[in-house]
Image: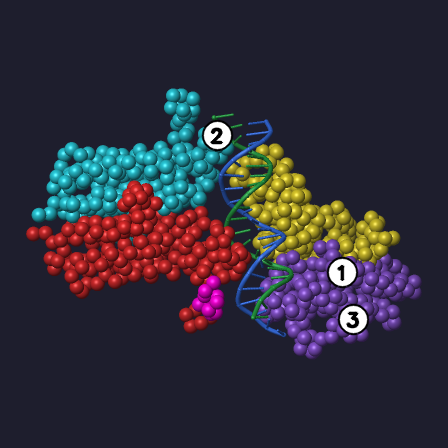
Chain colours: A yellow, B purple, C red, D cyan, E blue, F green
Amino acid sequence: MNAAGQPARTRIQREKRDLILEAALDVFSQQGYRGATIDQIAEAAGMSKPNLLYYFRSKDAIYQALIHGLLDVWLAPLRELDSVGDPLVELRAYIRRKLEMARDFPRESRLFANEILQGAPHIMALLEGELKPLVDEKADIVKGWIRAGKIASVDPWHLIFSIWATTQHYADFDTQVRVVLGPLKGGDGRFEDAARFLEGLFLDGLRPRA
Amino acid sequence: MNAAGQPARTRIQREKRDLILEAALDVFSQQGYRGATIDQIAEAAGMSKPNLLYYFRSKDAIYQALIHGLLDVWLAPLRELDSVGDPLVELRAYIRRKLEMARDFPRESRLFANEILQGAPHIMALLEGELKPLVDEKADIVKGWIRAGKIASVDPWHLIFSIWATTQHYADFDTQVRVVLGPLKGGDGRFEDAARFLEGLFLDGLRPRA
Amino acid sequence: MNAAGQPARTRIQREKRDLILEAALDVFSQQGYRGATIDQIAEAAGMSKPNLLYYFRSKDAIYQALIHGLLDVWLAPLRELDSVGDPLVELRAYIRRKLEMARDFPRESRLFANEILQGAPHIMALLEGELKPLVDEKADIVKGWIRAGKIASVDPWHLIFSIWATTQHYADFDTQVRVVLGPLKGGDGRFEDAARFLEGLFLDGLRPRA
Amino acid sequence: MNAAGQPARTRIQREKRDLILEAALDVFSQQGYRGATIDQIAEAAGMSKPNLLYYFRSKDAIYQALIHGLLDVWLAPLRELDSVGDPLVELRAYIRRKLEMARDFPRESRLFANEILQGAPHIMALLEGELKPLVDEKADIVKGWIRAGKIASVDPWHLIFSIWATTQHYADFDTQVRVVLGPLKGGDGRFEDAARFLEGLFLDGLRPRA
DNA sequence: CATGAATGAGCATTCATTCAT
DNA sequence: TATGAATGAATGCTCATTCAT
C-alpha cells in the first residue's frame, strides 16, 4: 500500500489494467452491466479470463474502477462553467464541450446512460455526494446571471438538464440519430449541425427579454 | 390464422398476453433485455414460467411483441404534430405531450432508451421503415413553417431530436433528475417546472427573428 | 407454506429430496464439506446438477438440511439414557446403542466428525442450544447415581465423552481399525469384540468401589 | 542425491521447508486436504506461491511430506510402551503421553483424523506397513501381561483403540468438548480432569479380577 | 391450459500449476 | 531463489427452454 491507500502497482500492471478498462468500456457501454460478460471483456482485452481476474478481483471491481475513474472526465465540462465572463459565451462553450464529448467519448456517455437508466445502483452515492453539490453550485452561478439581468429568467437546474439531454443524445441515441438523419445528413457533419442548432436554441432562448 | 396472418386468439388469450406484456414492461424497462429473466416476468405476471412460455415462444418473442406493440404509442405524439394551426402552438402541444408521456409512461421511454443504447438490435428495421419516414414528413412541415417565416430558421431534424432528448430525459434519467433536484424541487412538481422551462426555451428559441 | 412454515412439498418432491440427501450423506461423509462437489452428489443421486439444484437452492442448503435432519438420530441414543433402572444396565445399553449406530450408520458419524473437526461451523448453535443442555441433563442423572453409591465417583461429562469417543471410533476411524485388526479380526465380528471389550472396560471401571 | 535417496539439501533449504510444513500443518489440520489452498499455506508461510512450489513440487507433495514427517511423532507414544515394569504403570504412562499429545499437538491429531476419516488415501501403505506391525507387537506385550495375570483379560487391540479414541477425542473433537463443558469446566483444566477420569477408567477397568 | 420437473449452455470465480524473468 | 504473470480445469450457480403429464 502506498500513501493513498491504494495497492502499489508497477507500470506494467497499470498498463494492463488500463488495457482491461479500455476493453471493459467497450463492452459495458454496449451491453450494460448485466449484459456484459467477463469473457467478452477478456476477449476484447486479448487475455484469458483468469488473467483478467488476476488484475481485477471481479466483474464488479472492473465496473467500479471504470465508472469511478471516468467520473471526473464526465463532470469536467460542467466544472469548467465559470461565473466570470459573458454568460452566453460561457454557456455556448459548455454546450460545445458537451457536444464534443458526445462526439469523442460516446462510450463513456452510454456507460453513464446505462447506469442511470438502471437506477444508478453503482453510483448513487456519487450522484448525491458529488454531482448534486456541483450542479447546485453551478445553478447558483446561473441565478447570479439572471439576477444581473444577463440572461432570461429560467430554472437553472432544468437548464442544465436540457443541455445534458440535448448533447448526450448524440452519443446515447446515436443509432437512432443516424437512421433518422439518413446517409446524407447523418455523417460526421451531424455534430456541426447539432452545434449550430443547439447554440441557436439556447442562445436565443436565453437572451434576456425586454 | 386470420386475414392478417396472425394466429387467431380468444379474448382470454389476449388478456393473458396483455398481462404478460405488462409484467414484461416492468421488468425489461428496469433491467434491460439481458438483465431481465423470464422468472422475473412470470413472477410479476403471477403465472408459472412454462405457462408464460405457452403464450410467448421465447424471451425474445415477449420482447418483440412488447416493443412492437408500443411503437405506435411511442410515435403517437409526433404523428399528431399538424401542419395546420399556429406553429408555436403546435410545437408547444408536442412538447407537452412528450413530457406527459415521460411522466405517465416512463417505463415505455426507458424500454426504448435501453433498446437504442444497445444499438437498436430489435427495432432497426422499424426505425428505418417507420420512424425515419415519419420524421422526414414532420421535418417537411417544419420546413414549411420556416419558409412561411412563422418560426426561426432551424434544422428541423435536430429540433425534433432536441424535443425528444429534453422531454425523455425526465423519464430515462429520472434517478439522476431526482437526486440533483433534491427533495424540495424533485417532487411531482418537477414536471411542471420542466414544462415551463422547456416551453420558454423552445418558444423563445424558435420565435421568428427579425 | 404449511403450518410449520415449511414450503409445501409433494410426495414425489420429498422422495427426490430424500434421494439427494442420501447421496449427499455418501459424499459429504467421505469428502467433507469442502471436498464434496455438487457434481458428485448429483452423480450419486442419478440426476443432473441443475435438477439437483431445483430441489435444493445450494450446496450449503443440502448440507444444512442433511446435518439438521440427522441431529435427532445422532442424539437419540443419549436421549434414551434413563435415570430409572440399574445404572450399569443403562450405561451398557447406551454403549450398545452407540456401537450399533457406529456399525449401522457410519456415514452419519463421519459427517458429524468432519463437521466438528473443522470447528463445527454449521452446527455451533445446535451444539450450544441442544447438545450441551442434553449432556448437562444426563450428567445430572449420572451424578445422582454416584450420590446414591450405585457407580464409582467419576466425572460425568468425561464419562460421556469417553463413551462417544470409543464407540464412534469404530465408524470414524474404521479404515484404520480394519487395517490394524487385519483380515482375521477385522471382519464383521469386530463390533462384537468391541462391544465385549467396552462393556468390560466401562462396567468394571465404573463398579462402585469399596 | 545422498545415501538415503533423498535430494541433498542445504540448511537454508531445510529451514524453508520446515517453515512451509509448519504453515501447512496449520492449514491442512483446520481445513482438511481439499479445503486447504496453496495460497493459504503460502500466506501462512510468508512467501509467494511459486516460491513455495519451488520447495515442494505440488500441494500433494507438501501434504505427503507433512504427514510422513509426522508419523514418527504420532507413533512415538505407542513405541515407548514397554513390556518391562508394572503393566498398569506402563498403561497409565501411555495414556498420559497420548493425552499430552492431544493437548500439545492438536493440529497433528486433527491432521491424522482428517486423513483417516477420508479413508486414509495418502497413508494406507504406512498404516499397513508400519502401524499394524507396531500395534501387533504391542498387543503381544499386552497378551503377555494378561497371561501373567497382571491385568484383566481383554482384547489388546480394542484396548489400544480405546486409548487412542479417548485421548485423541480431546484434540479432534475439541470444539465440541469445550461447548459441552462450558466456560467453567472447559478451560485448560479439562485435560487434568480427562486424565483423572481416564486413569480411573482404565486402571480400574483393567485391574486383574479375582 | 397449466405446471412440476428437467437440462444444456453459460457465467463468475477459484485453484493448482506453469512460465518467464 | 524468488516472484509477477498466466492459464486449463474445475466449481457453484443461473437461465432460457423443453418435456411430461
> Which residue is the site of mark 2?
D54
> In the rendered view, would you say B16 is above or below A203?
below
Element class at badge 1: loop
- In the figure, residue D16 lies in which quadrant? top left
Element class at badge 2: helix
> Which residue is the site of mark 1?
B123
Looking at the picture, which amino acid does disc 3 mark?
Gly
- Estimate the spatial distance between the alpha carbons at disc 1 and disc 3, rounded to whole Å: 20 Å
Q: Chain of mark 1?
A: B
Residue sitting at the far bottom: B11
Q: Is residue C13 magenta?
A: yes
Check contact, mark 3 vs mark 2: CB within 8 A. no
Q: Chain of mark 3?
A: B
Q: Residues within 10 Å of mark 3 (few under 14, many from 20)?
A: few
> Which residue is the site of mark 3?
B5
The image shows residue C90 at horizontal and vertical percentages of 20, 60
Between residues C151 and F15, which one lies in front from this camera angle? C151
The image shows residue A57 at horizontal and vertical percentages of 55, 44
- Residue A181 visible, this orientation: yes
